[in-house]
Each structure stands twice: as structure tokens, then as C-alpha cells.
Image (cartoon, coloured by chain):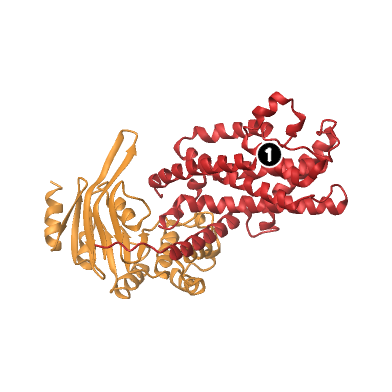
Chain colours: A red, B orange
Amino acid sequence: MSIPITSLRRSFAIQVRVTHALIMREIITRYGRHNIGFLWLFLEPMLFTLGITTLWTLIKATHGSSLPITAFAVTGYSSILLWRNCSNRVIKAVEANLSLMYHRNVRVLDVYAARLILEIAGATTSLTVLTIMFTAMGWMNFPVDIMTVMLGWLLLAWFAVALSLVVGAASERSELVERVWHIFTYLLFGLSGAGFMVDWLPKAAQEYILWVPMVHATEMIRHGYFGAAVRTYEDPIYLMLFNSALMLIGLAMLKETGRKVEPE
Amino acid sequence: MIALENVTKVYDTRQGPRTVLDGINLRIKRGEKVGILGRNGAGKSTLIRLISGAELPTHGRIHRGLSISWPLAFGGAFQGSLSGLDNVRFICRVYDAPVEAAIAFVEDFSELGTYLKEPVKKYSSGMRARLAFAISMAVEFDCFLIDEIVAVGDSRFHEKCRVELFEKRNDRAMIIVSHSPDYIRTHCQHAAVLAAGKLNSFEQIEEAFDFYQAGEI
């Protein structure tokens, strides 16, 4: 008996439909239809970033360097939000959607995809709006090299997706993961390059900190914002290799998770 | 045609792996109606979920040559925080069914009125059952999977469901899981008995009942 393989085009059409359905479902339950609803998608990360920017300005977090603090805080904290929100949102995502997984075409990857697309859209809009707003207000200069910023942001979003697949799949295996991951993100916060430039570190420490993948993205984004005013140490190839490996592990883990899902 | 080839399902339980279905073979032709009998915990619902694709088999293959519904039962397949209407929209998007027509049908059939705008988790079980049945009739399939839905709501609604499913959709294939011999006798052409992980198929329904009852002693 020949088994008809669903054509790639049809699969793609199903993928688009299911992702759209899940995104709408997320928007309705998360933001509701009342008051400003959907706007929270980027207002929430924006307010967070504004708070941190204010705080860092007050404590002069640039450690005596001549960098403009607003741009420094906006780039740093937006970067954190991108990978942290993504990886936090996939935890328990299966549980919240278990009853919808009665429908054959709704799979774990789709549930994750919907949430990740929303988080990335929110963080990206927040960064864009803040940059335009602060530039207009004269608190920061517009990025010197927008292409480098976009590329760095894209690589960080890729990292966030790959990381989330691993964290999400792991959280389905053990409840411990959820607890440990929250602690872990706080530690990674400090190491991610959001609060410092690699150039400020002693040479010996630089070598070690450059093993942390997020540092490369943060450095790259700041390279784009500040241009020649700063010395950055990013290696996009390293980040891409890291992302590819992490993505592969995440997809493999997710395949196994998908086999074990039992809809309510 | 739907074909199950050597389908096995093993669950990881606290007491170790448990084989619920063990090498199941089953073929369902277009328009054919098959009843599946089995005691509580025999794996009837698991079988239905595997056929629907909601769960994946541990071994074996399932070929779906017909479009197959999700397991129609009077619970699941809803997101509790969404309103009844939002659940309809969700399902229409997933199955590529026209939304407006589906909403009109559900409003008319479920008789839930303004409750359709409330979150499903606030519904009574009877209301939920009415919504579930209405939604599942709003999307068309070649084969319906029916999991133990015998008595829904009052007798008038029950009759409405019967007409909608068994009269208007008499040309469709159905796989019906039930405890009730009468229900299967009325609606199916063939029957199979699920016992100890194996599926025993019978051409004649009465043979299946004899086998099923013999197992109860």
C-alpha cells in the first residue's frame, strides 16, 4: 500500500493556519479584549526597560566610561528580555494548551512557535519604539549602523528560540527545570553582557566571558548603536555555530517530548 | 481507507512501562461504521486518540486516507479560558473551515445564546457537551471518531444529536467506542473487542457481543 506523503506546500499551509490560530488564542487569553489589550505585548517589555534605564542612569552603571547611559541600558536590557522572556514563556506552555492538542495538527512545536513569535515581536517592537522615542527626545543618538544592529538582534532571537526549545523540552521532563531555570536566568543576566562591555573587563576575564553566547549578540548590537565609539569583541560565526548546535539539540529533545504528549 | 498496521502503545507509568495496545491491526473503508467494545481501561480511548493522531504510537503505522475528526467526546478539545465562540474560531482556523458559517451553526444548534461569549470553564457539563457536539458538527470529516457519547443533555437534545450525526452524516465512516451494546447494534455494521491489548475483529456484531460477554465471566 502506498502511503501518500503530505506535500510540502500543504504542510506549510497547515503550519501557517495552526500557528495563526494559536497566536490568536494566546493574544485573547493573555491580553484580553478589554482596555488596551494587545498593546501590552510591547508595553510590558517597554515599561521594564524604562524602569531599568532610569535605575541605571541614577546609579551611573556605565562605570565611569563616557558611553551614553540611555542607549547602553536600552540595548542591554532589551537583549536580556528577548532571550529571558522567550525561555520563560515556553515553560508550562504544553500544559496550558493540552486540551487543544486533541487536534492532530496542533503539536508541541506549534504551541512553542506561537508563544516565541509573540515574545520576539513584543521585544523587537519595544526596542524599536524606545530607540525612536529616545532619539526624538534627544536622550540618545540613532544607531550608527542599523544593519549590524539588526543582524545582532536576529542572531539573538535565533539564540532565544534555540534556547527555548531546549528549556521547554527539558521542563516537560522534570518539574525541577522550572525552578532551576529561574535562578539560572538571574545568573546569566549578570554574565550576558547587558551590564558591561567586554572591553571594560581585564584581558584574562575577556577570554572566559566570550564563551557566553549572548555576550556576542549584545556586543554586536552595541557595535551597531555606537559604531567606532566603542571597541567590541563579537564573533558572529561563533554565535551562529552555537545557535545551530543548540537548535539541533532542542529539536531532537522536542521530537521526543511530542511523542509523549497525552492530551487531557 | 484508514489502516492501522501493527500499532503498539506503551505508556510510562510509575510502575514502569505498560503496554496498553499490542500489535493492533484495523482497516476502515469509506462509509464503514465500526463499533469498539471493551471494558474500562481496556485502551478504547487510547485507540481512538491514536487513530485521530492526537497521540503517536510507540510502534507501528497509521495510514489516514480519509479526513478524520478529533475524538468526539463531551469534554476535551476546548481551551477553558477562551469563550465558546473563540473556541469555534480556533477550531475553524486549525481545520480551515469557514468561520462565519460555523458560528451560525453553533449558535443555532447549541442553543447556548449569550453564554457563547463566556469562558468555557464557566459552563456546566451539560452546556459544555452541547458546545462540543455543535463544534464537531460544524467541521466536516470523512470519518468521525466517537468516544462514549451516548446520553447528552435532555432527550430532545439527544435526539437532535442523533439526527445530525447518524442521519445527516449517514454516508461517513465512524469508529464508535461504547459500553452500550444497543448503541453499537443500532449504528454499526461491524464490531471489535479490545481485551488485554489485542483487538479481536468480528464480521457479525453478535459474535463480538458473545466474545465480549464471555470475557466478563
Determine if residue A188 is in view: yes
Q: Quadrant of the N terminus of chain B?
A: bottom left
User: Camera-side residue: B131 or B154?
Assistant: B131
Please give the count of numbered marks on the rendered protein.
1
| Residue at 60% from the left image edge and 34% from the top image edge | A182
Give the secondary structure at mark 1. loop
What chain does mark 1 sit on?
Answer: A
Task: Name the residue that disc number 1 marks.
Answer: A234
Residue B119 point in image, percent of width and height: 54, 57
Residue A46 point in image, percent of width and height: 73, 48
Q: Residue furthest right?
A: A138
Q: Using residue A30 as the reference point, say whether residue B178 is left or right of it.
A: left
User: Camera-side residue: B19 or A258?
Assistant: A258
Determine if residue A43 is in view: no
Instruction: Residue A215: name its quadrant.
Output: top right
Residue B136 point in image, percent of width and height: 40, 65
Dot 1 amino acid type: Glu
In the depicted structure, whether residue B187 falls above or below residue A128: below
Q: Using residue A106 as the reference point, say whether residue A164 is left or right of it.
A: right
Q: Using residue A172 as the reference point, say whether residue B170 is left or right of it.
A: left
Residue B147 point in image, percent of width and height: 32, 58
Instruction: Residue B49: name its quadrant.
Output: bottom left
| Residue at 79% from the left image edge and 45% from the top image edge | A227
Pointer 1: residues within 10 angstroms few (<14), some, or many (20+)? Answer: many
| Residue at 48% from the left image edge and 46% from the top image edge | A95
In the depicted structure, whether residue B73 falls above or below residue B163: above
